[in-house]
Every structure is written in structure tokens, then in C-alpha cells.
Amino acid sequence: MRSLLCLFAAVAICALAGGTTGRAALDPVASARGPDVELLVYEHHDCVYCQLFRRDVLPRYQQAVAMELPIRFVDIAASGNEGPGLARKVDMLPTAVLMLGGREIDRIVGYWGPDNFFKLLAHMRAKVG
């Protein structure tokens, strides 16, 4: 119950700060602002927390968010920890990076569980307007 209240408080703050209004303000995963917005998730096949992310977060993400904010998984072993448009190196896995026009807007570092992930994602998405 407490996490639900925190979620609604965060959404209300975003709305008051000039974020979305109306029904979208109640939706913590309101639509992204264009086709050039995507979420990159840096992972490694041996990473236990990356596996937990795929198990616990990905199904809910695919149902609620994927149509509006495409997700792409990046194997850090194949790509390295520095990618085009990243503000800094990826030091911890999994790392979810919100990209807009090929540039990093914000990131979620580490595995925080599904509820916290979606709260953090709502804050990040508010930055893209």
C-alpha cells in the first residue's frame, strides 16, 4: 500500500511540475514522446540480476509500456561498456538507459525490483516531456 501511495505522489509531482495531465498523469508509464525514444537495457548472460530483470520486469513492461517505449537489450560482452550517446560508462548490470534521439536522458542502475523500476521509469519518462 505504501509503495502505491509513493507512486501516486510521484505521478502527482510530475503533473504539477509541468508533466502530463488528465488520465495520462495517473498512468506512471504514460506514452513516450516520439519514435526516437527507446530504453536500452545493458546486460550480460551470466548476470543473475539481469536474469531477474527479464523474469520479473520484462513481462509487465511488455504489457504496459513496450508499445510506447521500445526496449532493446544490449549484451555488454559484445558491445562494451561505452556506447554511442551514453553520458558515461555502464558500471553495473543491469542498467536501463532512456535514450532520446540517440542521446542518454537518464538511467536506472542495478536491479531494484519491478515496482521500484516502474516508479523510476516514470520519473525518467517525465524528462522527455
Image (cartoon, rainbow, N blue to C red):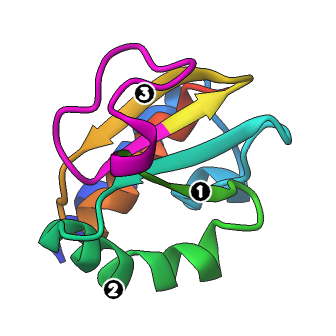
Mark 2 belongs to which amino acid? Arg
Q: Position of residue 11 (x, y in %)?
A: 45, 47
Instruction: Name the quadrant of the C terminus.
Output: top right
Image check: 32 left or right of 105? right
Asked which secondary structure carries label 1, the reply is strand
Q: Is residue 17 above or below residue 19?
A: above
Q: Is residue 40 above or below residue 101?
A: below
Does residue 15 appear in this view?
A: no
Q: Nearer the viewer, mark 3 or mark 2?
A: 2
Residue under the image location 52 percent in, 29 percent down: 16
> Which residue carries the number 2 mark?
55
Q: Which mark is residue 32?
A: none
Instruction: Name the quadrant of the N terminus.
Output: bottom left
Q: Position of residue 97 (x, y in %)?
A: 45, 38
Q: Over which residues does the magenta segment extend?
A: 77-97
Distance from disc 3 to disc 2, alpha carbons, whole Å, reads: 23 Å
Asked which secondary structure carries label 2, the reply is helix
Mark 1 belongs to which amino acid? Arg
Residue under the image location 52 percent in, 37 percent down: 98
Does residue 129 belong to the magenta stretch?
Answer: no
> Which residue carries the number 1 mark?
72
> Which residue carries the number 3 mark?
106
Give the mark, 3 or 2, whose residue is nearer the N terminus: 2
Does residue 126 appear in this view?
A: yes
Q: Is residue 39 above or below residue 45?
A: above
Quadrant housing residue 12: top left
Give the mark, 3 or 1, whose residue is nearer the N terminus: 1
Mark 3 belongs to which amino acid? Asp
Distance from disc 3 to disc 1, alpha carbons, whole Å, reads: 15 Å
Q: Is residue 40 above or below residue 2?
A: above
Does residue 94 belong to the magenta stretch?
Answer: yes
Residue under the image location 59 percent in, 31 percent down: 99
